[in-house]
Amino acid sequence: MLWPVRFAFKLLSRLGLIVVAGAAGFLTGLLLQARMEQQTWGVDPADVKRELPGDELVPVTDTVETRTLRIDAPPEAVWPWLVQMGWGRGGWYSYDKMDMDRPSADEILEEFQDLAEGDLVPTHPEGGFIARVVDPGRTLALYLDSELIQAQLEAAREAAAASAEAIVDTPPGLQAAGAVGDLAMPEFRASWTFVIEPAPGDGSRLIERMRVWTGRDGLVQQLGLPSFGLGVFLMTRKHMLGVKERAERHVS
């Protein structure tokens, strides 16, 4: 007479597995939806599939993020804020305590207005992105990969070893990057493109696109580091709003 109890136990166990699987599927769906919204913030659906200058820098990707923002200022008033970006330059107009050693600029810095293709756009004292497309007033495309990072770290080490001052007091950025540089750098390629287009009412549309290849599975890429994806979204959103606020204030 124990079979009804056993049957009920098996049924409840299976129902429990179904509930757990359903909850996991629901959570996965929420995470994917959140990532999609972060990756296409402010974007018209047509912009997601649209080709932009700089896409060719990372032709094969496992992550593409496109975001847009209207700025109530003409393109020529937006460009100076983009071209002067970088560590030790105009900053990133984002959360400065996280990616700068000083506040981002609130004024146009004339000494950083002549960026050329091949120039460094630093993210830290020892290196950063390389400008690959510079079309003044219209497009800025930056590029970075694992080989560039390794080369920049090696160059920084050699400079530190050749400098008596650096031997005594290693730059903080090199101290932080040194531990990473001693490890095998995972292979990756990334581009960060900024496109400025005229908008009605003497305004502009700022389009930003990140293209990343890591060689990881697409679903793992989407779900493996959700907090990192959220962090990138928050930083870039703050950056875009920072450009907007400065450009609009400068023309008002």
Image: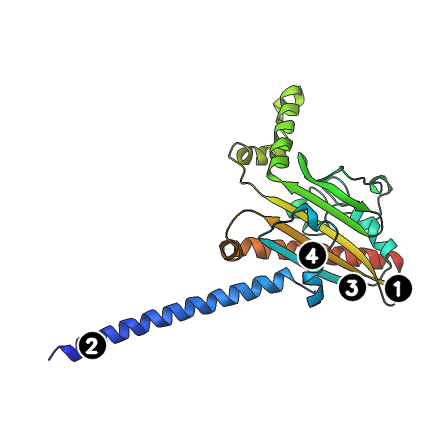
Going from N to C along the chain, the mark reached first, 1 or 4, is 1
**Relative vertical location of residue 132 with respect to residue 193 in this rendering, above or below:** above
Which residue is at a point 67% across and 63% down the rendered structure image?
Answer: 41
**What residue does disc 3 label?**
70
Q: Which residue is mark 4?
A: 238
Left or right, 35 with reference to 237:
left
Residue 106 higher or lower than 153, as above or below: below
3D distance between C-alphas at marks 3 and 1: 11 Å
Seen at 57% across and 55% down, the residue is 229
The residue under label 2 is 7
In the image, taking residue 70 as reference, residue 210 lies left or right, namely left
Which numbered disc flags the more N-terminal residue, 2 or 4?
2
Dividing the picture into quarters, in which one does residue 167 lie? top right
Tag shown at residue 202: 1
Q: Secondary structure at mark 2?
A: helix
Q: Where does residue 145 sit, x and y in percent of width and height?
A: 62, 40
Judged by depth in the image, the label closer to the viewer, 2 or 3, is: 2
- The numbered mark, 3 or 1, whose residue comes first in the sequence reads 3
Label pair 2/3, CB-CB below 8 angstroms: no
